[in-house]
Structure formats: C-alpha cells, structure tokens
Amino acid sequence: MSAHDLWFSDSLGNRLLRRLLTPASWLYAAGWQAYLGLYRTGVRRSKEPHHPVLCIGNLTVGGSGKSPLTLHVYDLMRSMGREVVVSGSGYGSPAAQGAQMAPNGPLKASEWGDEAAMLRWFRPEMRLVIGRNRVLAADLVHREFPDSVLLLDDGFQHLPLKKHLSILIDEPTPPNSHCLPAGPYREPRGNRRRADLVLPSEFQIVWEFMGPFEAVTLEPVPKEAAAIQLLTAIARPERFVESLNALGFEVAQKSFLPDHDPLDAGNLLESVDPNVPLVVTAKDWIKLKDRADIGSFRIWVAWNEASIQPAHEFDQILHAALAKTP
C-alpha cells in the first residue's frame, strides 16, 4: 500500500488506518507548532545572509507543481532583467548534504537530484545551488552572486532562512487535511497564513500539458489516438494518466514507482514492449536517459507548464518584492 492510497483511498481498511493514525498526526502537528513557536517568540531567529529570497513552497508531501511554478517565476524575473539563482534540496542525491553551487552544463540526477537535473535541462543557463542547508546556500549565493535573486524551489518549512516573499500552493478544499502520518501535510494547514500569497486564491495557476514529445529531439508526436505504455516515479501519477487520456491516448500498460525513485533497477524495462511508445514525465526522462539500455525503446516525454493569472497583478507583486531594500 502506498502513502497516496493510505491518505486518499476511500476503502474501509484505509479509512480505519487513517483513524488509528490520527493521534500520531495530532502529536506531529503539536511538535511542529512548538518548533514554529520558537521563531515566533524570538527564541530562535531566522537568518538573512542574502536579499531578496523568494520561495515557491507547499504544505504537503510532493506533487503540487512547485518546479513548473519555479520555472515560471524564474522566467518572469529574468524578463525583468534580474539575475536569478535557484536553490533546490537535491533530494535523494549526495548533493543534498550541506549546500554547493552546481557546475555548468547538464547535471546527472544521481549526483544532483532529479529536480535539479530537470531544471537545468529546461533552462541550460540556470544557476543552481543545491543542498538542504538553505542558510548555507544563501550565504554561498551572496558571496558569489550578491546582486542576484535567490529563488527557492521548496523550502517553506525551512524556518532558519528568512524569506522576503513566500508563494504557497495549497488546494482550497483538500480531501485530507491531516498532518503526517494520517495525511499528507508537512505542517498544520492553518499555517498557510504564514505565506504572502496562497495559490489558488485571487490568483490562479493555469496549467498547460506539454507533449508528448520525442525524448531526444523534442519533436511533437501525432495527437491521434494510439496505444502507449506509461512509466513514472512522481507523487501524483493519476493526474499524468488523466492528461494523456484527455488527448486520446490509450494506456495499454502502466508502472508507477515511488516519487524520486532513481529508475536504475536492472529489470526496470523488462516488461516494456519496444514496439509501443513509452511515455514518461520530464523528471523521469532526466534519469532514464543515462541508462545504457534506453536506446532500445521509443521514449516520449511530457510535462506541465504553469503560469499565474492575472499576470499583470502578479508582476506587480514580484516588482514590489524585488524593490524592497534589506
């Protein structure tokens, strides 16, 4: 049973298990509020080694669309003439320890994390600082790129670093608003008031499903109905399936692995038919492309792009945040 099934399945067994885990969720929430209280009362203080710091965050475990939104905000700030450095955690990679500037050029997901490798694939010029220690990351950026904007892909829960604008993604009516372990929330949902802007609200995220495209050439594939295979390691794979079904594709076979799975198992592709296109997300492809056996398969890749509307009003919020002096 996956965590997603536990949190959202309506089966009797999962409902009972959620009920049994609810007291543990209350303890988790109380612990988080106590931790937050240390900062609210001044016992601990957030550090400010760099200015400005913008954060694209959420309250739940995975699958909210932070990375596409990070790309959108990155592009907007670049269009304003600002230098931008993106901070990622490097989840599941050796680079997650501490913080370090990523080298130029393509990044290996196994070394820098799948999200960092994907962001660099989409934006080859992007400067990236990788590691869970966001205070150290901000200090590195301030020393090497003092005039830049530091943009955090995730990090809303990282209280030791002061943020100057926090944008939070959170569903208006979540099907399960419990904290871990009975639900997906990393901190109590009421803490969304800590954010400067919660999406959706008066602002909406507009999603556009891009693809599928041939993985190597990124040439668009025909949109007529066709049988496909699906392999993905993302937090909410059912949304990916729904997007493909909406385009008329018939999913003949699908394999869902845990979010951030390295996709390096030797038998991973044993059941894949080389004569049927295999559709993956951009985050999956960035890991699959390094496999020695991937050339035997026809790979199609798809991803979501995000924008925030109304655009003019959101641009004004960004301008105001960037204009503030330390």
Image: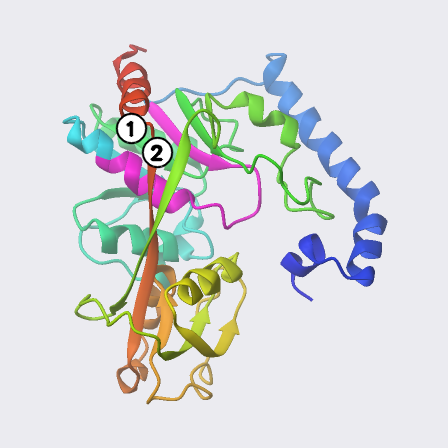
Residue 232 in percent (x, y) is at 45, 68
Say which residue appears at 40% left-offset and 22% top-offset.
165
Where is mark 1, residue-wise? 311
Answer whether labels 1 and 2 touch (C-beta < 8 Å). yes
Q: Which residues are magenta?
A: 53-75
Q: Residue at x 33, y 89 (%)?
A: 275
Quadrant of res 295: bottom left
- In this rendering, the answer to whether 89 lies above or below 218 is above
Q: Classify 50 as above or below 113.
A: above
**C-alpha gap between disc 1 and disc 2:** 6 Å
Nearest the camera: 252 or 321? Answer: 252
Residue occupied by mark 2: 308
Q: Is residue 66 above or below residue 308?
A: below
Residue 197, given in percent of the width and then of the height, sits at 45, 24
Q: Which amino acid, by three-letter code, is at mark 1?
A: Ala
SS label for mark 2: strand
Q: Quadrant of residue 142?
A: top left
Residue plotted at (33% across, 19% down): 317
Which amino acid, mark 2?
A: Ile
Can residue 264 be seen?
Answer: no
- From the viewer's perspective, tell me whether residue 80 is left or right of residue 269: left
Figure check: 248 above or below 35: below
